[in-house]
Image (cartoon, grey):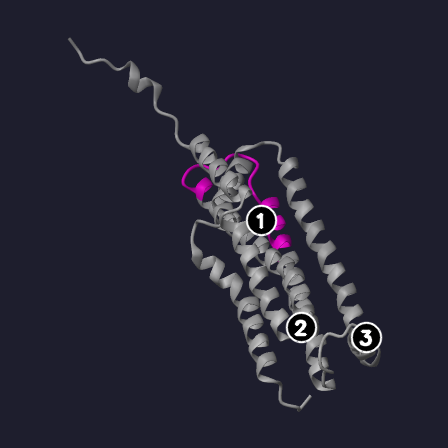
């Protein structure tokens, strides 16, 4: 692994790492135009509605569903990591397969190791994200369980809802990072076919992800639904004010 990497491969790897590690922080800075940013506001209303309910079984079920999803993807990541480790120990067979598919000039053994290590590193990083999301979801469950049975007075109720939504949003944002590792791992595998395909796959993947968050049909529908949620939770006008008439 001491052989210098060809310039095209080095440029493709740098581009991939830039978008892989930079997409999440960049998305947070795009602003309220993304679905994930809008979800933070929706979760605040969810937590506030939960505090106003006597029966919170439905809320617990929704949180439990997310916990099971995170556990499933974490387990799947372990399987995928094991598979790639198996490929790493059998590079001779992989070299023969790549040559048989005529992907191009024969790849140096050291470069081939890098090309297998890339999706492996992405999945390991994603596994850490998913397990950290699980821990944060457990913290959210503990906070929900500690909520009082009686409706807290204002402004305590609003403050509790904001803090609960903050912890839950952090957990689900980390969960989203873990899910994205699958996409980037698939893009990283294309490096086996050459650096130009890796660049194209990376740019195509980021384009799809940005489209889903900002301009897709579901993004537009979610923006409209969020506006309706805001209207539904807006303070209703005081009916007594309409009954007041000026004295004669």
Q: Which residue is mark 3?
A: 100
Residue at the farthest bottom position: 2
The label on residue 143 is 1
Determine whether 230 is above or below 68 in the image. above
Residue 241 horizontal/vertical position (percent): 29, 20
Q: Is residue 100 magenta?
A: no
Marked residue nearer the N-terminal end (1 or 2): 1
Locate residue 6: give its quadrant: bottom right
- Pick the residue in front: 188 or 224: 188
User: Where's the N terminus, which quadrant?
Assistant: bottom right
Q: How many marks?
A: 3
What residue range appears in magenta?
A: 136-158
Residue at image location 59% in from the left, 66% down from the top: 200
Q: CA distance from mark 3 to mark 1?
A: 56 Å
Q: Within 10 Å of the Cα at label 1, are there few (<14), some (14-19), or many (20+) other Cα atoms?
A: some
Q: For numbered disc 2, what is the local secondary structure?
A: helix
Inter-mark Cα distance, 2 to 3: 16 Å
Depicted 239 relative to depicted 105: above or below: above
Q: What residue sits 44% from the left and 41% below the top? A: 158
Give residue 191's mark: 2
Mark 2, mark 3: which one is toward the viewer?
A: 3
| SS state under label 3 | helix
Residue drawn at (46%, 30%) of the image: 232
Quarter of the image where the C terminus is located: top left
């Amino acid at each position: 692994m001491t052989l210098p990497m060809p310039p095209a491969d080095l440029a493709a790897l740098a581009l991939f790492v830039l978008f892989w590690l930079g997409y999440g922080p960049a998305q947070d800075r795009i602003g309220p135009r993304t679905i994930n940013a809008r979800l933070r506001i929706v979760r605040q209303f969810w937590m506030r509605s939960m505090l106003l309910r006597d029966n919170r079984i439905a809320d617990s079920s929704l949180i439990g569903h997310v916990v099971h999803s995170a556990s499933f993807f974490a387990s799947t990541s372990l399987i995928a990591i094991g598979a790639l480790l198996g490929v790493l120990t059998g590079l001779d067979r992989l070299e023969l397969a790549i040559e048989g598919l005529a992907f191009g000039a024969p790849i140096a053994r050291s470069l081939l190791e890098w090309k297998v290590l890339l999706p492996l590193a992405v999945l390991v990083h994603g596994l850490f994200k998913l397990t950290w999301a699980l821990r944060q979801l457990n913290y959210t469950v503990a906070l929900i369980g500690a909520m009082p049975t009686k409706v807290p007075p204002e402004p305590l109720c609003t403050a509790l809802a904001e803090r609960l939504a903050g912890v839950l949003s952090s957990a689900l944002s980390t969960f989203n990072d873990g899910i994205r590792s699958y996409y980037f791992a698939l893009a990283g595998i294309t490096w086996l076919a050459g650096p130009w395909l890796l660049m194209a796959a990376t740019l195509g993947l980021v384009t799809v992800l940005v489209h889903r968050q900002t301009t897709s049909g579901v993004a537009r529908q979610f923006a409209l639904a969020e506006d309706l949620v805001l209207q539904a939770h807006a303070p209703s006008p005081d009916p007594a004010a309409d009954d007041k008439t000026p004295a004669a």
